[in-house]
Image: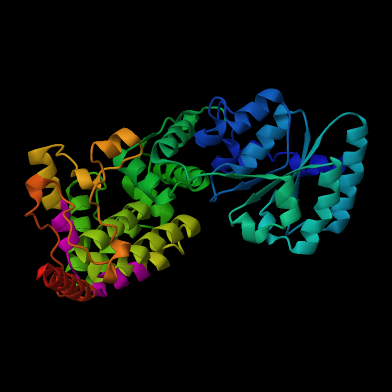
Amino acid sequence: MDLFESAITPKEPSSQPLAERLRPQTLDEFVGQEHLLGPGKLLSGMVQAGKLRSLILWGPPGTGKTTLAQILANSAGAACVHFSAVTSGVKDLKKIIQEAEQLQRAGKTTVLFVDEIHHFNKAQQDNFLPHVERGTLVLIGATTENPSFKVISPLLSRAQVLVLKTLAPADLERVIDRGLTDKERGLGKLGLAIAPAAKEFLIQQAQGDCRVALNTLETAATLAEAATQKEIALSHVQEALQQRPLRYDKAGEEHYNVISAFIKSLRGSDPDAALYWMMRMIDAGEDPLFIARRMVIFAAEDIGNADPRALQVAVAAKDAFHFVGLPEGKIPLAQAVTYLATAPKSNASYKAMLAADADVEEHGALSVPIHLRNAPTALMKNLGYGKDYKYAHDYEGHIIDQEHLPIELRERHYYTPSESGYEKQINERLRYWEEKKRERKKP
């Protein structure tokens, strides 16, 4: 098993980066991915049962794809060999298959872990297929790219795709704390602490990547040691990352100041300023999906029907970022910012919503007019439910003179379109309908 041994034999611990030394060996050490590893979830059940099936692990860097593959293989007592698009070829695969067949005859499973499987072309991926079908290999592929586009359909049909998520700030904090305190594999023997501001900055800049967090922590610890300090300061983390934090507190006043400036720049139709404030937030570590959510709200509240496409653009930008991630995800966000800033503005829908809500709050549950009520039974019909209801499609131009509000509110008028953008056409349409209704009332 020379190839297997060379693929999985670890280096000397002292020569390994902190992230590699702290790689979890069991699920108890693993942090994050609760949607896959929590009680009763797929992977935890697979580990408990010790039975493996082929998987495609899709997620951003530093979320534990390689580690999960190793833990799964160990839990089943399987031989695990790594296969790289860069260093491995068909000759290597043939040798792996030969040795896997020997193990299979001995009743042992072989897990082939294919890192960055999206780098393999169609022909290379085809080489895995017959061996996965025969059960000679259990394939676990890891990818940061959408497997729908990067993995051939026959492999996808024989493997379950699992989506891994970026680590939450609380998860990264646990990882950092362990890195500092673990005396066997971590930095615990150094007796170092980390300043709260330094830890917060490290968590922000790691962007959910466990590997970045730990390796930066190790470099920052080296800098603190060199300065004969027992606490890792913000300056050490800044130097390790070669970045300086912008003045921005995600939980404090500056957070609200900057997001306020962003929204007001959009409302003021200033695309340059809106782009600046967006990049300020992203570069300072703000969750880009928070910014996207604010744009979705803005599109409905401040643009509304003056440009109904604005909401579509904002939602599409949110979905695009969720799909692409950083850093390229900033591009669709920027497109949405410039669209929203330059779109015609109207808050008429928002004001109408507030007015209607105020009446609901003041008057409570008013009765539905009897002609609008549903009448699914004979009794309801006999009681007059739905009587005299006018079906709009039966009338010329689909225009009807019919009250749809509760009787107590029949004089209310909530929505008054502006003369901005598409709402000007809506206004013209409403005025035309009112004129037609008046004409039909004439003798």
Residue 442, horizontal then vertical, whole percent: 9, 71
Residue 361, horizontal then vertical, whole percent: 11, 40
Q: Is residue 77 above or below residue 423?
A: above
Residue sitting nearer the eye, 251 or 131: 131
* Left or right of 4, for residue 333: left
Is residue 244 visible in the rendered image? The answer is: no
Residue ID at (44%, 39%) = 172
Please give the range of residues in magenta. Answer: 335-353
Is residue 73 visible in the rendered image? The answer is: yes
In the rendered image, the quadrant that contains the C terminus is bottom left
Residue 11, horizontal then vertical, whole percent: 69, 41
Secondary structure predominantly adopted by residues drawn in magenta: helix
* Left or right of 58, for residue 265: left
Residue ID at (53%, 51%) = 60
Q: Is residue 337 above or below residue 226?
A: below
**Residue 74 falls inside the magenta stretch:** no
Q: Is residue 66 above or below residue 353?
A: above
Residue 274, horizontal then vertical, whole percent: 25, 68
Residue sitting nearer the eye, 208 or 435: 435
Q: Quadrant of residue 288?
A: bottom left
In the rendered image, the quadrant that contains the N terminus is top right
* Left or right of 174, for residue 91: right
